[in-house]
Amino acid sequence: MTLVRPQPGTTFAVVGALAFAGCLIFGSADFSGDLANYASTAVALLAGVACLARAARLAGRLRLAWGAFGLGSLSYAVGEGTRTWTESIRGQEVPGPGLPDVGHLGMVLLIAVGLLFVPVPRQTIVNRVRNVIDALMIATSLLLISWIFVISPLFAQGSVASPAGSVALAYPVGDIILVTAALSMLALLRRGHPDTASLTLIAAAMLVIGVSGTIFAYAELSVGFIASEVPDIGWYLGFTLVFLGARRGAQQTEAHPAEPAGSRPFAILMPYAVVLSVLVFSIVWFAVHGHGDAFYSWCRSALILIIVARQLLTLLENRQLTATLESRVTTRTAELLASEQRSRALVSQSSDSVAVLEGDSTIRFQSDSVERIFGWPAQTLLGSRLIDIAGPQAGPVIAAALEEAGAEPYAVITVEVPLAHRDGRVRVAEMTITNLLGDPSVGGFVLNTRDVHDAHELQNQLVHEAYHDALTQLASRALFAEHLDEAMRVRPGPEVAVLFLDLDGFKEVNDSLGHAAGDHLLVQVAGRIRESARDGDTVARFGGDEFAVLVRSVVARADTEAVARRIVAAIGRPFIVMGRELHVSASIGIAVASEAADLQQLLRNADLAMYQAKTAGGGGWAGYHPRMHDLLVDRLALEADLRLALDRDEMVLHYQPTVDLRTGEVVGFEALVRWQHPVRGLVSPLDFIPAAEATGMIVQLGRWVLTQACRQAVAWARPVRMAVNVSVRQFDRDDLAETVAAVLAETGLPARRLCLEMTESVLMTDTEENLAQLRRIKALGVTLAMDDFGTGYSSLAYLRRYPMDILKIDRSFVQRLGGDSRDTALVRTIVDLGRSLGMETVAEGIELPQQLAALQTMGCDFAQGFLLSRPVPATEATHLLNAGLSSRLVFA
């Protein structure tokens, strides 16, 4: 229970009112009259100030209402104070009408206006009309009483026509207005209004003041002016209530929804209670006096008419309410019907079949959707036991599920069973059984059945695709890892070995002939690997041209080596792809699980072994050895040092001369990069160029080589040609032509003295892009040479398309000169081909005099090789350029 502390001044006001009443009752007449005047003036003044102070803290209509209450109280205080000053202090009679009358009547007007400003909830027009009629009922009833006791006697005196008489008539009319406004405001107050208690005190005050004024007027008309204690106490008490209402704080009450008119009995019954009280009183009065005047009759008639209007309005309201209720019932009924139809349609068209089963699985209800899902008409299933018609496989499962669900109310059990479609197909169905045997509206098992057969097939397909390679249908990396993990967990068990395979030359095939040809080749390779593996071995494609084989055997290493030999032999045979014969080989690495700590290490060991096989030249296999890991670590360290080599100025260029086979004159040099490592010494390009290619450092290194070589060519001040090799990775960048142009501009080397050499692998990678690059470089005036000619694919097809100036005959062909006549014919064919295409030919790798003589005889233009000179530093190259080679060799 919450205790509310009284507001400051409340206790004082209550004690003062009791003391004032005691003084009036038990004091002398003179003392009581003066006390009444002073006390009424003071309490009205206090009430006015309190109301204005409250208004200052509010906003909106409440501020206006409390402001009007305050001004009305001050108006009364001014009027009563003037009367007290004139009569008690100055001892003079107050002339009428005068300022006291203005103050008293101003109070009536201001407070009535304030009561009208009290905010009430928004109302409909009908409610507003009813409120006006209720106010008329109250006012007419009060007018009838006032007529009997006050107004009629005033008219009987005949003084109403004079100003004093008009003022005297205004007092009872004002009392009627005050009481009517107060009762009307009380009727409109809603529960939850923050000022309900305070406004109730104001309404009570106005009732007390209005009744006190009427008693005072009646006493004055009946027995002459007397110092009546009752009116004085009433006025004092009324303004005391105003003061208390103003001082009472607003209560934060719980918000309530808008209340319909019928939920406020006071607002409905109050006007009738007033009318009933007046009618009873008037009947008694009429019975005592036995007569009534015309105004009395007119008032009663008007009151009857107002009551009739009120009843008609109530009847109209009731009819409207009834119509609204009927409309809502109709709408709600339609909504329920539509909802029921919608529910039936949803059940009928649902992807689930809905059924209600008895405890023994007898079908009591079956939705029509079962025919669309499983082909069986719903009517043919009613009355049948589901466990009997579901079939020998599904029936026992359903019976067990029903028994389990029946053990607990509202239990839900889901099972999957095979159900026969009417067309004979067997479909996988998902059944959800809900136990509603205890629900009076159902009283059975509710069975929701859906066809999940397609979903199962899709799931199985997705699982197959996740665990199998889409192109070759071999196992995927994920399935291979699962099989390998399972095999390694079996202890003791068969030995486990892994074969890891990578194709040699596949990238060139893919880039030259297209991805479609590459895919055809991979499918054939997968077939040959599968044929070479044993039954029970897991063959997988890891992606690209990488494959793996899992071997489980007592002698897994020996069996894996046998499989590797078969695979190498099988893949070594030619492949026919899109009508063309292709040759590829495979590099295979083998690792055994006993040499690895876990699955990842086993796969890494196999990968290292495969890399070793590829480094050895490809087309073979290699078993894992721990030193391979050391080589890997060394290679990683080499790559880390390579990234710092340029910054540390560890790279140097050696130059191998190019000799004119007709004159023996040095006509150019090929720039070859060397790495002078501070610890390893002079590192061969065969060791660090692949690392530079793999890490991307080849682009930065290639620019450095190009720049240094061009500077050296300018430094020689002789018109020799400088040849520089270009990597595939450099062609991957779109700015190669711009880089070459920038270096030529930076070093001042004429473009005609620069020769860029590239292998056929450059020409077969992104051919359109590279062709555009080569044309931009050729436009600079740079010479272009095809290095290692004859070792790639479809070489002749590219010769006519690309703007090449020089063919460099690969050393593998030159080294075989002097032996098989077919090799000699092949070299002669290349020389003749170059001549017919207007291209110069350069033979590289000359080590024997007979090779030199053969090339001279064939008409080859230029030569390189150890017989002529090894690659030498710049100082030695300068000596060769100045001295020449004719002193050491004889040229025809």
Image: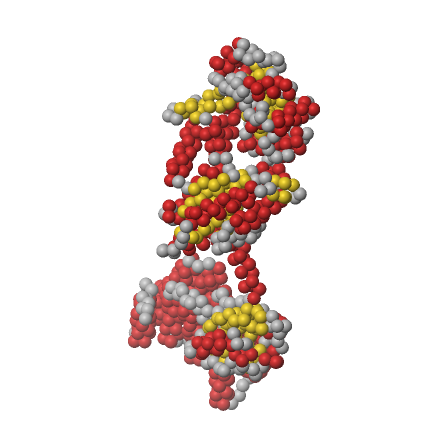
Q: Residue 622 in the image: x percent, y percent?
A: 45, 40
Instruction: Tell me if residue 83 can be seen.
Output: no
Instruction: Tell me if residue 624 can be seen.
Output: yes
Specify whether 155 is left or right of 829.
left
Specify whether 287 is left or right of 579.
left
Would you place residue 661 above or below residue 178 in this image?
Answer: above
Quarter of the picture containing the N terminus is bottom left
Q: Residue 87 in the image: x percent, y percent?
A: 38, 66
Q: Nearer the viewer, residue 823 or 285?
A: 823
Q: Nearer the viewer, residue 50 or 764?
A: 764
Residue at x 57%, y 40% (from the top left corner):
584
Quarter of the picture containing the C terminus is top right
Total labels: the figure holds 0
Name the colouring of the figure: secondary structure
Q: Residue 151 in the image: x percent, y percent?
A: 51, 77
Residue at x 65%, y 26% (from the top left corner):
829
Q: Nearer the viewer, residue 556 or 60?
A: 556
Q: Residue 329 in the image: x percent, y percent?
A: 58, 77
Residue at x 46%, y 29% (from the top left corner):
688
Residue at x 59%, y 18% (from the top left corner):
853
Q: Nearer the viewer, residue 662 or 301?
A: 662
What is the residue that sits farthest to the right in this orientation? Answer: 836
